[in-house]
Image (cartoon, rainbow, N blue to C red):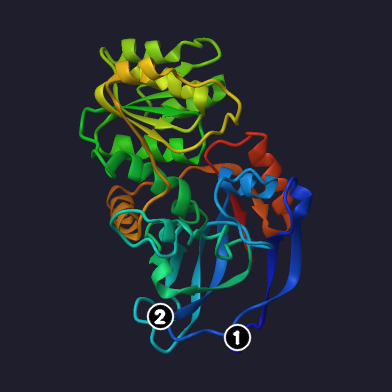
């Protein structure tokens, strides 16, 4: 068959609202170079980062008229003549930072983010360097695999990147977004124990069904950090910190001496008052900021997903590519449980 010359695609044409998301049914596709592949996307998933890019609050550089979306899964339909990692028909998943293969993170690597600096996955077809893709887990569907590049890899890095989680460790997760749910699943697969927080009774039940050992409703127990320390008889070993300045204060109360608080995001938004310097010091914990993870970590995570048959948790609402603005609003309104996914046909 002849290769497509154009693709359906979204673009971020301006910032400040989701109205700046523009849909193009005839976006031109570049010619394949020797080391590139053409991917037919079957699925994508959304992250809070996508909301921030559209709203103009993302703290890293964003190219004008960028095609959004870091997370996608699809099939290789054509390869450049020097491609060795994949062949036509290979099922692949995008790497969040296209040049982050392993080792220390660098400013140059940070500038290779898909959907921010490099055109992303919210389109029908895309051209990628072969090194910016990984093989899709054999046990997952396209929709499931499309959830992995950002939130799942972030959770994996949080639990294994600096201080590897051990059986019997306690992990604290916050809420029911993609990073927190993946961290819960990875922790249980490693033989660890989990304290999860939520504000919803129905979501608390789902967290327990996924294996959470304790669930704290943070609206009923605002001082949930001390409650987590009480429940774990001394504090947690890992905190997956996604909330913001206020939740960090509680996280420092929950963590044990020498424990690890991994700062991933600030869903609660700017303007909150954070912990004081004495609070940070007195926790005697390690506080670490991360941005997703490397290809080496991604491929290790995929082996674990296959070995333990871990299935990503998808929100019950599946959106079509043409419904992207509705998907963004759905995620922004925090109506989801697990990952918000987009089916691409």
Q: Quadrant of the C terminus?
A: bottom right
Q: Is residue 44 left or right of residue 103?
A: right
**Is residue 230 visible in the rendered structure shown here?**
yes
Kindly identify which residue carries mark 2: 87
Element type where label 1 sits in the image: loop
> Quick one: label 2 or label 1, which is nearer the N terminus?
1
Depth check: give the residue in front, 203 or 27. 27
User: What residue is rendered at 45% in x and 63% in y?
Assistant: 93
The x, y position of residue 22, in whole percent, is 76, 60
Kindly identify which residue carries mark 1: 3
User: What residue is rendered at 39% in x and 65% in y?
Assistant: 134
Q: Residues within 10 Å of mark 1 (few under 14, many from 20)?
A: few
The x, y position of residue 309, in whole percent, is 33, 49
Q: Check the image and name the residue furthest to the left.
A: 167
Q: Is residue 1 left or right of residue 162?
A: right
The x, y position of residue 287, in whole percent, is 34, 31
Give how far apart the Cα atoms at labels 2 and 1 are.
Answer: 15 Å
**Is residue 311 visible in the rendered structure shown here?**
no
Image-quadrant location for residue 159:
top left
Q: Residues within 10 Å of mark 2 (few under 14, many from 20)?
A: some
The x, y position of residue 236, in whole percent, is 30, 22
Depth check: give the residue in front, 322 or 275. 275
Q: Is residue 95 left or right of residue 119?
A: left
Vertical placement of residue 16 versus 139, above or below: above
């Amino acid at each position: 068959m002849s290769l497509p010359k154009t693709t359906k695609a979204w673009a971020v044409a301006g910032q400040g609202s989701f109205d700046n998301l523009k849909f193009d049914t005839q976006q031109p596709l570049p010619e394949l170079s020797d080391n590139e592949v053409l991917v037919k996307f079957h699925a994508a998933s959304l992250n809070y980062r996508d909301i921030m890019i559209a709203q103009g609050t993302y703290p890293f550089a964003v190219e004008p008229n960028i095609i959004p979306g870091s997370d996608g899964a699809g099939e290789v339909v054509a390869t450049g003549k020097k491609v060795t990692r994949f062949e036509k028909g290979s099922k692949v998943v995008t790497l969040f930072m296209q040049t982050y293969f392993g080792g220390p993170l660098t400013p140059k690597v940070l500038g290779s983010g898909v959907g921010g600096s490099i055109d992303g996955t919210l389109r029908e077809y895309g051209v990628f360097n072969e090194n910016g893709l990984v093989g899709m887990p054999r046990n997952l569907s396209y929709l499931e695999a499309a959830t992995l590049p950002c939130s799942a890899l972030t959770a994996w890095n949080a639990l294994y990147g600096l201080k590897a989680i051990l059986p019997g460790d306690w992990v604290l997760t916050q809420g029911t977004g993609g990073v927190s749910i993946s961290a819960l699943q990875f922790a249980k697969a490693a033989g660890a124990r989990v304290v999860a927080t939520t504000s919803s009774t129905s979501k608390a039940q789902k967290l327990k069904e996924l294996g959470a050992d304790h669930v704290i409703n943070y609206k009923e127990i605002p001082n949930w950090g001390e409650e987590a320390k009480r429940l774990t008889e001394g504090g947690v070993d890992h905190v997956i910190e996604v909330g913001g300045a206020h939740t960090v204060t509680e996280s420092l109360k929950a963590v044990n001496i020498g424990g690890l608080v991994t700062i991933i995001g600030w869903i609660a938004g700017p303007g909150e008052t954070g912990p004081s310097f004495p609070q940070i010091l007195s926790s005697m914990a390690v506080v670490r900021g991360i941005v997703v993870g490397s290809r080496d970590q991604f491929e290790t995570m995929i082996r674990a997903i296959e070995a333990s048959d871990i299935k990503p948790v998808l929100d019950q609402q599946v959106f079509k590519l043409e419904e992207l603005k509705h998907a963004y609003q759905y995620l922004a309104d925090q109506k989801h449980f697990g990952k918000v996914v987009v089916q691409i046909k």
